[in-house]
Amino acid sequence: MKTKIKITVTIIIIIAAVAGGLYLGYSLNLFSLPSFVKNPLSIEKTANVVEEVKKIGELTTACYYEEIAMHDTRVDTTSILGIKLHKKNEVVLIGKGIVRAGFDLAKLTEDALTSHGDTLDILLPEVEIFDVIFNPSDFSIEYEDGTWDNETLKPIKAEAKKQLEANAIASGILKKADESGRKHLKSLFATFGYNEVCFEIAK
Amino acid sequence: MKKKLFTIPILVLLVLCVAGCDHSQKQRLEARLQTMAETAEIGTVEYTVKKIVKSSDQQWYTVGNRKILFQTTAYLKAGIRLQDFSADKVHVDEQNNVTVILPHAQLLSFNMPAEEITTVFEDISFFRSRFSADEQNYILQLGEADIRADVPNLGILEDAEKNAKEVFTAMLQQLNYNNINIKFE
């Protein structure tokens, strides 16, 4: 009888210790549970509020895509009973960004298009970068150790954006957008019977 | 016997830790991809959309709840893809009247900048861990997907077509066409 009780108590202690260990490990983010055990995170239904509607005239003629890896570390210092404790935080992110460039047709003046016969003269604005885009779905957190959140990741993402824009310019996006724009405008106006299209860039 | 009792959970934890830490992920840092592509799109409207992204996480095996709330802004641009436009979509008659058939408007770009995402509120009960950066990013991805799914109801595509009509009409007026008829198909 005594042995039976001993075995039962032992089993209960083992189960409690394993469950406690698992719960502690899970709480400390040491591992994640398989997806079939865990209810996936979800969001509550909230309104998508249109705050502003703006008329634009952006002719996008070149896009630059790049996958950028970012690595950052941070040391947090806390003091407990006068003893300073240092904790290293480390994160690795991969972001897939897009840069869009082209001509802002909203800047065209009223006399920007002049035609004579089958020749068309166009006074275009200078080519420019419209957007440098990294959406949440473009980021993946590859490695995360310590405390990281949306706010602590902001400067890393901002740096990635800066780097993406600089790389796009260095790779010649503006030249590409200019050439591609002229080519597409030529083919667009050819459909209206203009065999020759001459471009001039407004300064 | 007592020693064994403590050894088992420690071993379980160790095995789970080793399985959970994937250091090969760091090696992926080396991978880098960059490409440039030509395109021809006329963006005619930009919508600024604000959204509160709210998530609450309560699992059957956890003690306590955790909640997070973000304020986000997304910039959506819509317009016409000129790649889908060809010469047979333009008809000019003898009286210099022109009919142009444009492709229907589409969403051309979606931008939810990180600098305009703010964590407004976070409530974590005592027995729960904070939302990791990965979980927060996943919640924001759900918010992004929700706005994207709502695009047909926002009216942005209708506005894009209306504005495209104005852009093409103004351009063709400068080219001295008489009656300008813009259609979408």
Image: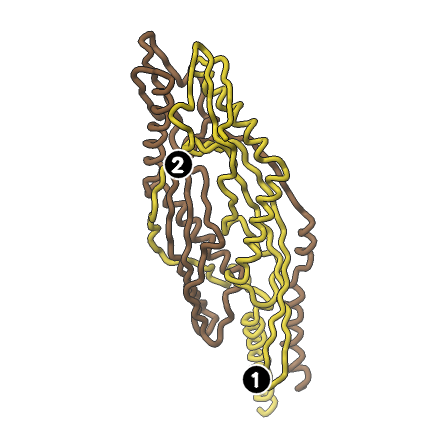
Chain colours: A yellow, B brown
Q: Is residue A176 above or below residue B174?
A: below
Q: Residue at x 51, y 45 (%)?
A: A133
Q: Residue furthest bottom?
A: A2
Mark 2 or mark 1, which is nearer to you? 2
Sequence-first tag of 2 and 1: 1
Q: Hey, what amino acid is under mark 1?
A: Thr
Q: Residue furthest left?
A: B179
- Can the viewer see residue B20? no
Q: Residue at x 49, y 56 (%)?
A: B138
Q: Which residue is mark 1?
A: A8
Q: Residue B174: x percent and y percent? A: 37, 20
- Can the viewer see residue B75? yes
Q: Nearer the viewer, residue A114 or B160?
A: A114
Count neighbours of disc 2 (C-alpha within 10 A) and say few if under 14, some if 14 to 19, many if 20 or more.
many
Q: Which residue is mark 2?
A: A56
Q: Residue at x 54, y 33 (%)?
A: A62
Q: Residue A165: x percent and y percent? A: 57, 44
Chain under callout 1:
A
Q: Quadrant of residue B56?
A: bottom left
